[in-house]
Image (cartoon, rainbow, N blue to C red):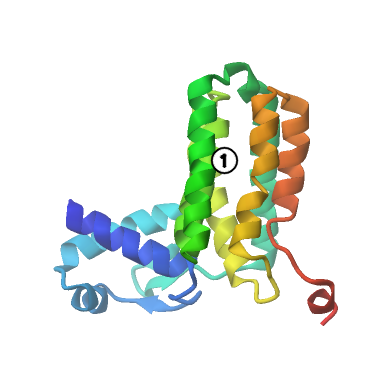
Amino acid sequence: MRRRDAIYSTLKRQIVLNELKPGKVLTELAIAADLGSSQGPVREALMRLQEDGLVQRSGHRGTTVTPLNPEEAAEILALRRRIEVRAAPRAMRAVDDAALKRLARLIELMGEAAAADDAYALIEHDTEFHLEIFRLADLQALEQILVRCILHSHRQKLWEPRHRRPLAAAVARHDILLELVRHRDGDGLANALGQHIDTIVQIEPQRAAS
């Protein structure tokens, strides 16, 4: 099980960071050879990646890294926005000191990842930060949908060649969210989350015009 999980984590990281390019064909045999594993754990890892929407598996075409489609990405981002924004006021009813402590710690971990120039670790902590707030709303049936939306919004952001935002600046964007949670300001948090999600991809004016 540990081998399967390690392979899954390795491939997921490579896909999210676009080290494995959209449309790339993946073979169980080649992955097993590269990672020093048998094909069984690789097959299980690829099935999990399919559930994440990161790969597409077809009997006659094999397995390929899911393409990045700008229109599809926009729809995913809109869905993520709707879920998080609508959950925010409800989540504020359940805020306690333990939740605030967890959120503050996740921002610290994001800062450590930024200092280490580890974009993937920052993504993982960022995801947990947003899920920590969302879970307070107790909308469990929507959590896996949100997880998938967050994952794909990060992948799209890293793929966008015009995106420019230092990792430290990405971390600082979460300070206002934590402050609004501290004040149990549901409406303010909903507005801030909407703006936060709308500006995940930062394109400099001169790059946008090119």
On the image, the x and y values in percent for residue 186 come to: 72, 25
Relative to residue 192, is residue 137 depicted above or below?
A: above
List the single residue furthest toward the top.
93
In front here: 181 or 28? 181
Can residue 125 be seen here? yes
Can residue 142 be seen here? no
User: Residue 58's image quarter?
Assistant: bottom left
Q: What secondary structure is found at the residue carrying circle 1?
A: helix
User: Dividing the image into 4 quarters, which one contains the C terminus?
Assistant: bottom right
Horizontal arrangement in the rendering, residue 129 relative to residue 92 (left or right): left
On the image, the x and y values in percent for residue 12 come to: 39, 62
At a point 55% along the width and 57% down the height, the residue shown is 152
Count of marks overlaid on the render:
1
List the single residue furthest toward the bottom.
210
On the image, the x and y values in percent for residue 24 come to: 44, 78
At a point 52% along the width and 60% down the height, the residue shown is 114
At a point 18% along the width and 68% down the height, the residue shown is 39
In front here: 115 or 205? 115
On the image, the x and y values in percent for residue 201 come to: 70, 62
Residue where numbered disc 1 is placed: 130
Circle 1 packing at 10 Å, graded few (<14), some (14-19), many (20+), is some
User: Residue 193's image quarter?
Assistant: top right
In front here: 18 or 51? 18
Q: Amino acid at mark 1?
A: His
Relative to residue 165, is residue 106 depicted above or below?
A: above
Horizontal arrangement in the rendering, residue 106 relative to residue 45 (left or right): right
Horizontal arrangement in the rendering, residue 182 relative to residue 44 (left or right): right
At a point 70% along the width and 75% down the height, the residue shown is 162
